[in-house]
Amino acid sequence: MKDWNEDYINNLKEVDKHIKESKIKLNYDFITEHYFEMYEVALNAGTIMPYRFNAIGLAYIGEEHNRPTKFKNFDPEVKERLVKSYAKRNELQYKYKDPQADAKEKYEKFLDKEIFDFIDEFPQYKDIILEE
């Protein structure tokens, strides 16, 4: 984890302990070890990373030009899939940010589902979940 802000990651682990509505506890050691690999694999497949990973990416403190990612030239189908995925995420975020929605439902149907969907698509990263 030499290229990662350990205090920031430890803070995320602490926050995880207090997300009672979520079934998922993330394995931050695994995620930081494979973050850029997962990012590359996902985007090259036309898939966006789960929303909860956004905060993890902010903990990267290594040199930007040394990020170990190699993006292929996206063909139009991959670009279209990414655009649709981001649009769908925005739609779901608005839906589940509704103050009338049950908090448990918000996490289980949006944040957790994104992670489970990611694992379904990329089973080699099943270890992103520490416990359920």
Image (spheres, rainbow, N blue to C red):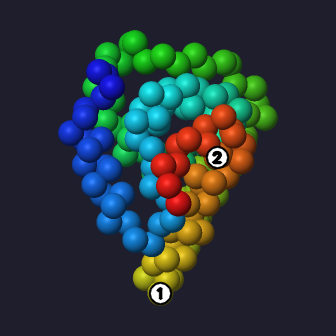
* Residue ID at (61%, 43%): 126
* Residue 48 versus residue 106 in the image, above or below: above
The secondary structure type at the circle numbered 2 is helix
- Mark 1–mark 2 Cα distance, whole angstroms, equals 28 Å
Task: Say left or right for 5 vs 98.
Answer: left
Q: Which circle's residue, 1 or 2, is located before the other in the chain?
A: 1
Query: 66 or 78, which lies in front?
Result: 66
Task: Say left or right for 70 vs 12.
Answer: right
Q: Which residue appears farthest toward the bottom when viewing the image?
A: 100
Residue underneath mark 2: 118
Rendering quarter of residue 112: bottom right
Contact (CB < 8 A) between labels 1 and 2? no
Screen quadrant of the N terminus = top left
| Mark 1 closeness class: few <14, some 14–19, many ≥20 residues within 10 Å | few
Amino acid found under the numbered disc labelled 1: Gln
Residue underneath mark 1: 100
Task: Say left or right for 62 vs 47.
Answer: left
Q: Position of residue 38 (x, y in %)?
A: 57, 31
